[in-house]
Image: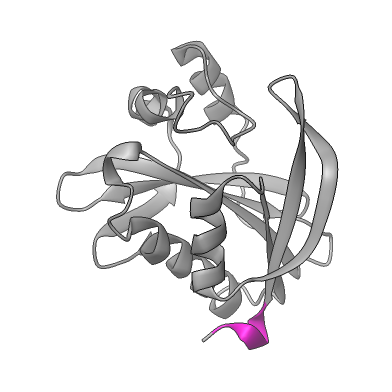
Amino acid sequence: MIETKRTIIRPIEHKDNKQIYSYRSDSETNKYQGWIPKSLKDVNEFISKNPTEFNKPESWFQLVIIERETDKIIGDIGIHFIDNDNFQSEIGCTLSKIIHGKGFATETVGAVIDYLFNKLGKHRIITSIDPENKSSINLVERLGFRKEAHFKQSLLINGKWVDDIIYAMLKSDWK
């Protein structure tokens, strides 16, 4: 679906379950995530919930990130097609810790942003980040997002109330 120099980004498939489980089940690396699978069954259920239609209003669509060199899944990107007018989207990214710090997040999230703005005609993209997740904050700021809101104890994640920061970007802000 979307290609970069080092990756292929395509819809999630059932055959991806073991690779997804291998990095998504790492509770320390994914401590800011709302979903950490406890079993392959959890991953299978997650994959089964992915819509069949891309860009469907009021749905989350999950894509996997495949490293070209190894042909292995190194992460995933979720896209929330927020409204019925379909002008806004929310994105979230999870990467395997083995590729952290190598520029894959900037490359792949940037490609998805470009696709949303320039191929799908989105007007605005947002992302929701735990304020303690400094790596994600640095990523979105590097890509040109601006901080719009900080909500105190607004999300219940893994039995704990956490803050939520909203970053956003308009198409006119994108390079």
Reply above or below: 175 against 141.
Answer: below
Residue 113 in percent (x, y) is at 54, 69
Vertical relation: 67 (above or below) 96: below
Residue 71 makes an appearance in the image: yes
Way the structure is coloured = one colour
State which region is magenta: 170-174
How many numbered callouts? Answer: 0
Percent x, y of residue 114: 50, 74
Q: Nearer the viewer, residue 95 or 11?
A: 95
Residue at image coords 80%, 55%: 150
Looking at the image, which residue is at 43% across and 27% down? Answer: 14
User: What percent of the width, then of the height, locates residue 2?
Assistant: 40, 63
On the image, the x and y values in percent for residue 1 come to: 41, 59
- Residue at left offset 52%, top offset 20%: 37
Is residue 29 a member of the stretch shown in magenta?
A: no
Please state which of residues 71 and 23 is positioned toward the viewer in this rendering: 23
Rendered residue at 54%/52% (across/down):
134
Name the one closer to the observer, 125 or 122. 125
Left or right: residue 30 versus residue 125 is: left
- Whether residue 115 appears in this view of the structure is no
Main secondary structure type of the part rendered in magenta = helix
Rendering quarter of residue 146: bottom right
Quick check: 10 above or below 15?
Answer: below
Left or right of 143 in this view: 60:
right
Q: Is residue 70 above or below residue 43?
A: below
* Residue 171 sits inside the magenta stretch: yes
